[in-house]
Amino acid sequence: MTRQLFYCTECGYESRKWLGRCPGCGAWNSFSGQPAPAKKRGAGPAARGAVPISVTEAAAEVRGRLATGLPGMDRVLGGGLVAGSLVLLAGEPGVGKSTLLLQLAGRVARPEAPVVYVSGEESASQVALRARRLGVEQPEVLLLPETSVEAVLAHLEQLDPGVVVVDSVQSMTVDDVDALAGSVSQVRQTAARFQELAKTHHTPVLLVGHVNKEGMIAGPKLLEHLVDVVLALEGEPGHDLRILRAGKNRFGTVAELALFSMTGDGLEEVRNPSAWLLDDRQAGAPGSVVAVAVEGTAPLLVEVQALVTPSTLGTPRRVAQGFDPSRLALLLAVLERQAGVRFGDRDVFVNLVGGLSLREPALDLAVAAALLSSAADRPLAEDVAVFGEIGLLGEVRAVSRCEERLREAAALGFERVAMPARQTAPATAAAPVPIARVGDLAALLR
Ligand code: TYD
Ligand code: MG
């Protein structure tokens, strides 16, 4: 008899009774009832007979990285796929996970090291159609439409592939787990089996994991501790921009990111993100400001738009897209107090153009400039880009990577950069416009 257990679908916390809020991760309404998963016999690493390995040998293993043929992907991974690593690619349905991994398959497949693309959601012909569209026509890309983990593992033993893709972890089932595909226990066991395969055969395995906007079902949180790397592919509906970043990386930093554009023939890395993001900018319009951000380790120019309009609502609206809403509230309070602009009876919208979402303190000054510009209905001088953090007292605070920011602004044709006055600017083609207090921004309005 299996006893009824409840699981948190976010983090896997187990409980005898249903709980409204998970004590493990704090998620609300995340419990689902499922039969307890069958206990695995002798599963610990000791039982599998792990042997001690010297640190130098272990380090050499990490150095043996496989280039994916997608430079952006390699960068985010920290220099390519590590042998024997288990990588989770998480993202909302339709964002382009299958596309990205099929393209990767085409780039890395070799006759002596084929790529097995396990498709649990689509038939071989559906995947083949997409492959043709993507120009992936190497015979070394082997499609395996299968949902049984045991069956897949049996094939992999025979094929000894160079890379394995499992699309998706939610579509697979392990035979001796009595639960539906996509359930907590199935997802966990599936990942555990592929982890074992990766480690014993030194084969990198890439798992696709779907995330849903309204609470994720057996999503990446659940697998985070099991996998070596969590990559997230993000994008806004209706926008071509896709952002790939690492949420966890046992073999590198999580600072790097790569920008892709979804085109008619697959994902194409955006080589000059700043130029791409500023492409259809409304220069000279009130409320439009170019911010010099840093994402990962690279500077990035992005247009910030603000719209400040009279409100007909008792509580005026504050809407931020791509920018932290609580940060927006703070900036509005600082501007009211320090720049004497009233927002109490006005709706405020702030948007980062291109569907990009950033958490970067240096965006503050650009957002403040956009708000002032829209509120005053006066455009900012067109040759100016902006960066700097704003403190609660209206002071403009120093930020990191000043020199890189100035160079990037200059490279994209900005002659002046409004930046923290307290920061010394190295000599570059873009002239610094020192801003000590948020109110100083008014001088830049035309
Ligand atoms: P897909 O890779 O199937 O997403 P996921 O696996 O994350 O669910 O991509 C689905 C979307 O991408 C779909 O709306 C069509 C679009 N797409 C393109 O625009 N160009 C292409 O070359 C491909 C293959 C897909
Ligand atoms: Mg897919």
Image (cartoon, rainbow, N blue to C red):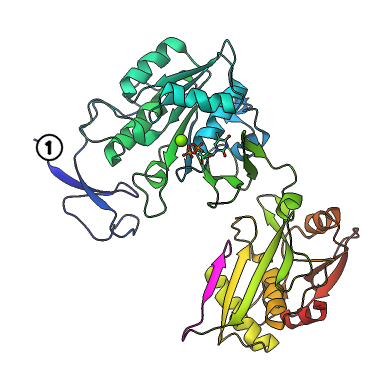
- Asked if residue 110 is among those painted magenta in the image, a careful observer would answer no
Task: Tell me if 417 is positioned left or right of 127 in this view.
Answer: right
Name the image quarter holding the C terminus: bottom right
Residue extent of the magenta highlight? 313-324
Task: Please tell me which residue is depicted at 59% across the width and 40% down the height of the picture.
Answer: 252
Q: Residue 283: percent from the left, percent from the top?
A: 78, 65
Residue at image position (91%, 58%) is 429
Q: Position of residue 95 (x, y in %)?
A: 51, 43
The kind of residue tagged 1 is Thr
User: Is 274 drawn above or below residue 196 in the view shown?
Assistant: below
Q: State the quadrant of the N terminus.
A: top left
Tag 1 residue: 2
Q: Position of residue 400 (x, y in %)?
A: 72, 60
Residue 181, how many percent across, how many down? 29, 35
In the structure shown, which secondary structural element does the residue marked by tag 1 occupy? loop
Q: Is residue 340 or residue 124 the one in the foreground?
A: 124
Residue 64 seen by the camera: no
- Magenta segment's dominant SS is loop
Q: Quadrant of residue 366?
A: bottom right
| Relative height, residue 21 to residue 268 (above, below) | below
Q: Residues within 10 Å of mark 1 (few under 14, many from 20)?
A: few
